[in-house]
Amino acid sequence: MKVTVLGSGSAGNATLIESGDTRLLVDAGFSGRDLERRLASVDVEAGSISALLITHDHGDHTRGMGVFARRWGVPLYLTEPTRAVCAELLNGRERLVSYRTSEALEIGALVVDPFLTVHDAADPAAVTVTERATGEKLGIATDLGRPTATVRSALQGCHLLILESNHDEILLRECAYPWSVKSRIGGERGHLSNRAAAELALELYHGELCAVVLAHLSEAANDWGLARDVVGSALSRRRYTGPVEVALQERPLDPVDITALRQRRLPPQLSLW
Ligand SMILES: [Zn+2]
Ligand SMILES: [Zn+2]
């Protein structure tokens, strides 16, 4: 299974998951054109996308969903409350598929398990995606609010974790955002700090965790290197030696090939000779 974060942050989020001919997009927080441009930059044709699944109704996850789903005839997976709140992005010509946060979905070669978060949206979900043939598991865990027991349980056993590391608590306090925005971001239903992301990553660490991508970083209240240091140094205490990448707002990250990373971790074959 190959995973490409096409962009992440408060100005837009989208992640591409590929397994054979199955190409799943999770979230479409960029304009339709921008989404097509980002896909083209990683050599993927927009017309080859199998499905688009939206996690929640905020604009940084939904912006291009209607345009993209209509233009390319891509099935658009939404929960009912999310569809109701996003009505102005839809015109009835989309192939809508309703999903529930408590039920697994099969999409081609992939199984998607949505789970509820306490983020401040109408029906906030995060997802894990598992490749049926290999059991390779990805967690896309942004816009969490706080790491509830449901979140911590759902994210067990991931080979790749895309984890929200939104802000540094001191930078958030000192930045130019109005007080109301600061309290929303740092509140119980907002976004995870670097410190909270580090604690969650430590808790979720297991011997087969291959890669961590930090995502949804705040431009005003975080720093790329700081987020990586805080989470990376916590994980290194558990002898984690895999990559800790930081997703960017303006362009896609290089794809993370979970299969290749897992193979690299296997001990070399012992020779009998
Ligand atoms: Zn968001
Ligand atoms: Zn959100």
Image (spheres, rainbow, N blue to C red):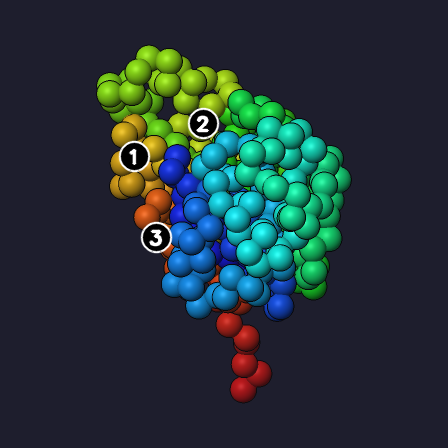
Q: Quadrant of the C terminus?
A: bottom right
Judging by the rendered image, the residue that carries numbered circle 3 is: 251
Reading the chain from its start, which is encountered first: label 1 or label 2?
2
Write the residue at 50% across / 32% down. Answer: 58
Kindly indicate whether the residue at mark 2 contacts the one at mark 1 (C-beta within 8 angstroms).
Answer: no
Q: Relative to the observer, which residue lies in front, 202 or 183?
A: 183
Q: Nearer the viewer, residue 264 or 140?
A: 140
Label 1 belongs to which residue?
Answer: 219
Instruction: Categorize mark 3 by other alpha carbons within 10 Å: few (<14), some (14-19), many (20+).
Output: some
Q: Residue lying farthest right?
A: 103
Q: Quadrant of residue 92?
A: top right
Dot 3 or dot 2: first in sequence order is 2
- Nearest to N terminus: mark 3 or mark 1: 1
Distance CA(mark 3)–CA(mark 1): 14 Å
Name the residue that disc number 2 marks: 191
Q: Residue at x 55, y 75 (%)?
A: 269
| Kind of element beneath mark 2 | loop
